[in-house]
Image (spheres, rainbow, N blue to C red):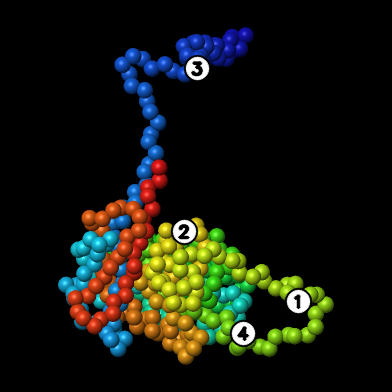
Amino acid sequence: MKRLLGFQAPALVFLAAASLLIAQSPSGPIVPQPGNPVQQPPPKPKIGVRVTLVNTPVTVRDAKGQMVPNLDAKDFRVTDNGVAQKITHFDLGGDPISLVILVETSSRIEPLLPLVRKTGIVLTETVMGPNGEAAVLGFNDSVDKLQDFTANHDKVEATFSRLQQGTSGARLFDAMAIGLEMLSGRPLPTADAPGRRRVMLILSEAADSGSDTKLGEALRLAQLSNVTIYSVGLSTTRAELQAQPKDRRPRATPPGTFGQPPQPGVPQTPTSEDARYGSGDLMQAVVWAVQHVKDAVGGNPLELATAGTGGAHLATFKNRSLENAIDEIGGELHSQYSVTYTPTGTNDTGYHEIRVTVAKNGLKVRARPGYYVSPPES
């Protein structure tokens, strides 16, 4: 009996204390005492939108199309929305490159895959360079990371030599978004520290199939992340010409039963028809794309992506081979100027137009046209 009472005594004390606390706790909302401020919930964090660093590649050629390698920073003038900017970092082809290579592995380019597999050594020697690093993404109906960033040339070349044919889709824009996210973590050059030039090289046909990402979204991200996009167009027409003769035996099912759905129609943009036939203002289409990121964009997406970031698109259908196109891109990358500035004296949000000029006559200058900064979230 004593042992039972010994066990019950602590329990009775605990129940009594709990009853006392319950009796003292007010029911309903707590009324603040006079003179005491009411505690407010923490404010929602505001997302900053100020761009602190803008890097633009600048390609300068003479009247014969040759690169001009003997200019200094004092020869360049950079404006952001018409306001002159101070150049904080200037370099000629010396900053090491962080490169993401997107390669289409769709079944539509299957006849071209043997040629693509042989380009690994051209990519490492002429584009990466001795101090560069590269990652490789393959895309069809899926986007696959085939090789993470590495400075090892042998690994990149081996990745290309093992490329396999995938399914019939081509999620180009989704692959671009993933590659841009990878590049956004690489260090940029500043006035006080060396960095890396962020470059994306796309080996693909000029079409997207099945992506959730819109071209305008990818283009806006590329501009804000200071990524320069280059592309080499893989021609499906050329692939068909190089393919084995098609099986034309009679079929029991109607023609087209197992065919791919046609490309969806796209709404007309201010320059969609002009861009389609190569006669319009490509930069106007670029500005429209980054301002209307949710809308489909007409025209060649590779041309828009490269023009909007200061790169170049090279087709391979005519007299330029795949290896020659990659070699041209590598030669330009290691012979172009890199100009960096911190935007001052201009608005924080909206579209920012970049203009780069050279204080010498007879030279043709190519740089990224601008970037778009979204307003802060409320």
**Cα distance between the residues tagged 4 and 1:** 19 Å
**Cα distance between the residues tagged 2 and 3:** 48 Å
Q: Nearer the viewer, residue 39 or 57?
A: 57
Secondary structure beneath disc 4? helix
- Residue 188: give x, y in percent of width and height: 31, 64
Secondary structure beneath disc 1? loop
**Cα distance between the residues tagged 4 and 2:** 33 Å
Identity of the residue drawn at 40% across and 31% down? 41
Can I make out residue 201 in this image?
no
The residue singled out by tag 1 in the image is 255
Q: Nearer the viewer, residue 193 or 211?
A: 211
**Nearer-N-terminus badge (2/1):** 1
Q: What is the three-letter code of the residue carrying label 2?
A: Val
Identity of the residue drawn at 51% across and 68% down? 298
Can I make out residue 286 in this image?
yes
- Residue 212: give x, y in percent of width and height: 55, 60
Which of the two marks, 2 or 3, is nearer to us in this view? 2
The residue singled out by tag 3 in the image is 28
The residue singled out by tag 2 in the image is 293
